[in-house]
Amino acid sequence: MLDRLLVLVLVAFTVQAKKHEDPECTMTTPQIIEHWGYPAEIHTVTTEDGYILELHRIPYGRNGFLFADAGFDVWLGNMRGNTYSTKHVSLSPKHDKFWEWTWDEMAKYDLQSMVDLALSTTGQKDLYYIGHSQGTLTMFSKLSMDPDFSSKIRKFFALAPVGAVSHIKGMLRFLANDFSLELDAYFDVFGAGKFLPNGWIMKVIADSVCADTSSMNVMHWLQMVKKGTVAMYDYGTRENKKKYGQSEPPEYDFTKIQNPIYVYSGDEDWLADPEDVSGYLMPRISHTVVQNTVLHDYNHLDFIWGLRAAADIYEPIIDIVKKDLK
C-alpha cells in the first residue's frame, strides 16, 4: 500500500456529461463512489475566513477510482460556492455577502485548509496534487506566494493549465467582448452575489457550467481575459489602494514557484488556449517543469470526461508517483 496522498481538486467550470436516465445523475459524489463499490468518507474544514468546505475521501480503490485502485488515499476537494461547499460560520448563501470572493480567496484560503486537513488526518507531511483548469490557476497562484505551503506539495500535476487567458474562446470571451467591465454596470446585469444570469445569457452558459460560483469570480476571469495577465481582483483604483496599497492589483509571480510540475495541455483547448500556455505560462514556470505533455485533439473537458484520459494522463501519473515513492 502506498503511503502518500493524492488530492484531486475539482473546478468551478465543469460540464454535466451524463444522460438524464443515468442513475448517477441524481446521486451525490459520495453516493456515486459507494455505487461503484468503494468506501466514501465526508470531511469538512473551516477556512480562515469562515467558509465551510466539504471534501470527499476514497481511502482505497473513473479517475479517482484509478488512483484508489493503485493504493492511494484520494481526497476530492470542493472550493467555496460549489454544491458541497455552501456553508459559512455566520453567512447564508442567500445573502450577497456570502458570495464576495473570487479565485483569489480559493487560492489563499481554500487550498490551505483542504491540504492541511488531508495531511493532519493522515499524518503525512506532503502530498501529490492534481488540478484541472481553475484548480491549476489557484495552485500556481498559491505556490507563487506561500513558500510554507509549497513544502506540502510534493508534485503538482497541472491538467489544462491556466495562466493568462487572453486567447480564450467560448462563454468568457463572449462576455468579455460584449459586456462592460465597469463594476457597477456588470453587477447591475448579473447581480452582486451568486452568479445567476437570466434568459438568453443563461442559454449561452447552460451547456458549459454546472457548479455555482460568484459574480465576482466571473468578473475576475473577465478581467484576466481583457488584461492578458494573472493579477489579483481589480476593485477599482480607490479600493485597490485600500486593499493592496497601490492603484493596480498585484500580479502573481509564477517565476517564484519551485515545486516539480508536470504539465498536460491540449492542442484544441478553448479555455487553456495553446497560445496562452506556450506564450505566457511556460516561460514563467519552465525552470521547474519536469514534463510538458501536449495532447493531440484534447479540448478543455477531455481531461475529465475524455475516453483517452485514463491511458494518456492518469495511468502515466500513477506510474510517475509510484516511481517517486520507490
Image (tube, grey):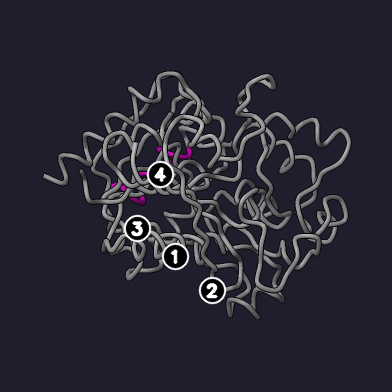
> On the rendered structure, is 188 left or right of 272?
right
- What residue sits right under mark 3 in the picture? 255
Q: Label 3 is placed on what type of residue?
A: Thr
Mark identifier at residue 58? 4
Residue 250 position within the rendered picture, expressed as x and y whole percent measured from the top left: 53, 67
The crowd level at tag 1 (other Cα within 10 Å; few <14, some 14-19, many 20+) is: some
User: Which tag, 3 or 4, sits closer to the chain's start?
Assistant: 4
- Amino acid, disc 1: Gln
Marks 1 and 2, how far apart in space? 9 Å
Query: Circles 3 and 2: CB distance less than 8 Å?
Result: no
> Quick check: 213 above or below 146?
above
Which comes before the other along the chain, label 3 or label 2? 2
Q: What stretch is highlighted in magenta?
A: 276-286
Q: Which residue is drawn at 58% across and 80% down?
A: 245
Mark 3 and mark 4: span between their CA atoms? 34 Å
Residue at 64 percent across and 29 percent down: it is 25
Label 2 belongs to which residue? 48
Residue nearest the viewer, comparing 244 with 201: 201
Tell me the amino acid under the disc marked 2.
Glu
Q: In the rendered structure, are the residues bearing label 1 and label 2 in contact, judged by CB atoms less than 8 Å apart?
A: yes
Q: In which quarter of the image is the N terminus?
A: top left
Q: Quadrant of residue 315?
A: top left
Q: What element carries label 2?
A: loop
Q: Is 281 on the left or on the right of 92, as rendered? A: left
How crowded pointer 4 is (Cα within 10 Å; few <14, some 14-19, many 20+) is rated as: many
Q: What residue type is labelled 4?
A: Ile
Mark positioned earlier in the residue sequence (4 or 2)? 2
Labels 4, 2: front one: 4
The mark closer to the camera, 4 or 1, is 4
**Residue 224 within the magenta-colored segment of the rendering:** no
Mark 3 residue element: helix
